[in-house]
Image (cartoon, rainbow, N blue to C red):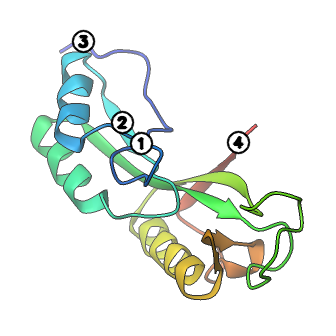
C-alpha cells in the first residue's frame, strides 16, 4: 500500500484539557483514510489517552508514536509563582517516545510534573528527567 509522505508529530486529542477536540477513534480513522504510516499523540501535560490511542492505531495498521507536550517552568519546577509575568509560568516542549525506555522515562517525567511541579498546570525542568533521558526525542515549540 502506498503511504503518505507526511506524519503528524504534534497532535492534541480530547485529553488535552481545554485545548484539544480530536476524538481518538476519529483521529486514527482519519489518519488511516489519509494513508499515514504513523501518527503521534502529544497531549498537553498528560498521557491519559496514550493506551487507547496506541491500541486504536495498532488495530488500524498505523504506527503509534506516543508523546507529550510538557510545560517547562522558567525556574525550578517546584516554584509557585509567575516568574514570566503570565499565570501559566511555563514554556512548551514536545517529547516523543522512541522505545520502551523512553515511554517509561516519559511516564516518570509527567508523574513528577503532577506530583511536584503542579502550579496551574503540571510543569517540569531539566532536573526532572529520570536519569539519562534515553529513548525519547525533544522538539522545542517555537
Question: How far apart are labels 2 and 3 at the CA level?
Answer: 16 Å
- How many marks do you count on the picture? 4
Q: Which mark is residue 63?
A: none
Q: In this view of the protein, which residue sits in the foreground, 32 or 74?
A: 74
Mark 4 = which residue? 141
Q: Earlier in the sequence, mark 3 or mark 4?
A: 3
Q: Is residue 94 left or right of residue 126?
A: left
Q: Are marks 1 and 4 in contact (CB under 8 Å)?
A: no
Tell me if residue 87 comes above or below residue 3 in the rendering. Answer: below
Secondary structure under tag 2 reads strand
Q: Which mark is residue 39?
A: 2
Mark 1 = which residue? 20
Q: Earlier in the sequence, mark 1 or mark 4?
A: 1
Q: In this view of the protein, which residue sits in the foreground, 36 or 122?
A: 122
Question: How far apart are labels 3 and 4 at the CA level?
Answer: 31 Å
Secondary structure under tag 1 reads loop
Q: In this view of the protein, which residue sits in the foreground, 99 or 33?
A: 33
Question: How far apart are labels 1 and 3 at the CA level?
Answer: 29 Å
Q: Which residue in the rendered view is the most extreme toward the left? A: 59
Q: Earlier in the sequence, mark 2 or mark 3?
A: 3
Picture quarter with the N terminus: top left
Q: Earlier in the sequence, mark 4 or mark 2?
A: 2
Q: Is residue 110 left or right of residue 40?
A: right
Q: Are marks 4 and 2 in contact (CB under 8 Å)?
A: no
Q: Residues within 10 Å of mark 4 (few under 14, many from 20)?
A: few
Mark 3 = which residue? 2
Q: Residues within 10 Å of mark 1 (few under 14, many from 20)?
A: some
Amino acid at each position: 500500500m502506498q503511504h503518505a509522505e507526511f506524519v503528524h508529530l504534534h497532535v492534541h486529542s480530547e485529553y488535552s484539557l481545554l485545548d484539544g477536540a480530536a476524538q481518538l477513534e476519529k483521529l486514527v480513522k482519519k489518519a488511516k483514510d489519509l494513508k499515514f504510516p504513523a501518527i503521534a499523540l502529544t497531549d498537553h501535560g498528560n498521557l491519559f489517552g496514550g493506551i487507547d490511542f496506541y491500541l486504536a492505531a495498532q488495530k488500524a495498521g498505523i504506527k503509534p508514536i506516543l508523546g507529550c507536550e510538557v510545560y517547562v517552568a522558567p525556574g525550578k519546577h517546584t516554584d509557585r509563582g509567575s516568574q514570566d509575568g503570565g499565570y501559566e509560568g511555563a514554556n512548551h516542549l514536545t517529547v516523543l517516545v522512541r522505545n520502551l525506555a523512553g515511554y517509561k522515562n516519559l511516564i516518570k517525567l509527567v508523574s513528577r510534573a503532577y506530583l511536584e511541579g503542579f502550579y496551574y498546570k503540571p510543569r517540569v525542568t531539566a532536573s526532572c528527567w529520570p536519569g539519562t533521558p534515553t529513548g525519547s526525542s525533544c522538539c522545542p515549540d517555537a
